[in-house]
């Protein structure tokens, strides 16, 4: 198991930027494929982006492509989500998630594949 803690959320105007961080406990962060998810009020939790253990493979939901960038620093046990050109529809609670993976290239978009979750950080984008 790995413990995850998100930070960096807040209130920003449309067109602005935020960088979310996900700090992981333990010494095996590099053994986990990671993902960022979000949940808006009244909506299901959805994938935003995911990244493999090595950081080589990444995937994004269509609505954030070209605006958001996922990255990780295994030496710092931290994953990031750089969010640019934010829109009001990006308003949600953002969660980081982890799943232990044997392959350094493995990524998954499926909510149910992740078994470690942070508590979330609120992102609010005003129009």
Image (spheres, rainbow, N blue to C red):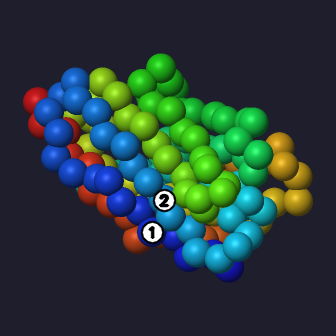
Q: Residue furthest top?
A: 66
Judge left or right: residue 89 versus residue 5.
Answer: left
The N terminus sits in image quarter:
bottom right
Horizontal and vertical percent position of residue 90: 31, 38
Q: Residues within 10 Å of mark 2 (few under 14, many from 20)?
A: many
Task: Give the CA separation, mark 1 to mark 2.
Answer: 5 Å
Residue plotted at (28% across, 33% down):
17
For residue 56, say whether it is visible: yes
Horizontal and vertical percent position of residue 24: 56, 68
Front residue (pair 74, 48): 74
Horizontal and vertical percent position of residue 89: 27, 35
- Relative height, residue 8 to residue 64 (above, below): below
Count of numbered circles on the image: 2
Residue plotted at (74% across, 59% down):
30
Residue 5: which numbered mark, if any? 1
Judge left or right: residue 101 versus residue 2.
Answer: right
Q: Are marks 1 and 2 in contact (CB under 8 Å)?
A: yes
Residue plotted at (66% across, 57% down):
75
Residue 22: which numbered mark, if any? 2
- Relative height, residue 67 to residue 61 (above, below): above
Q: Where on the picture, by quarter, is residue 33?
A: bottom right
Q: Residue furthest right?
A: 102
Q: Residues within 10 Å of mark 1 (few under 14, many from 20)?
A: some
Front residue (pair 64, 2): 2
Residue plotted at (30% across, 24% down):
85
Q: Where on the picture, by quarter, is residue 68?
A: top left
The C terminus sits in image quarter:
top left
Q: Where on the picture, by quarter, is residue 125?
A: top left
At mark 2, the secondary structure is strand
Residue 58: which numbered mark, if any? none
Query: Quick one: label 1 or label 2, which is nearer the N terminus?
Result: 1
Q: Residue furthest front?
A: 75
């Amino acid at each position: 198991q790995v413990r995850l803690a998100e930070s960096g959320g807040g209130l920003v105007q449309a067109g602005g930027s935020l960088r979310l961080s996900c700090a992981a406990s333990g010494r095996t962060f590099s053994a986990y494929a990671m993902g960022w998810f979000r949940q808006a009020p009244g909506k299901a939790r959805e994938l935003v982006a995911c990244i493999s253990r090595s950081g080589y493979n990444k995937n994004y939901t269509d609505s954030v492509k070209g605006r958001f960038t996922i990255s990780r620093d295994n030496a710092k046990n931290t994953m990031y989500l750089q969010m640019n050109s934010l829109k009001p529809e990006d308003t949600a609670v953002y969660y980081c998630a982890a799943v232990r993976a044997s392959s350094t290239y493995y990524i998954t978009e499926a909510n149910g594949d992740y078994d470690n979750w942070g508590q979330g950080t609120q992102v609010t984008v005003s129009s």
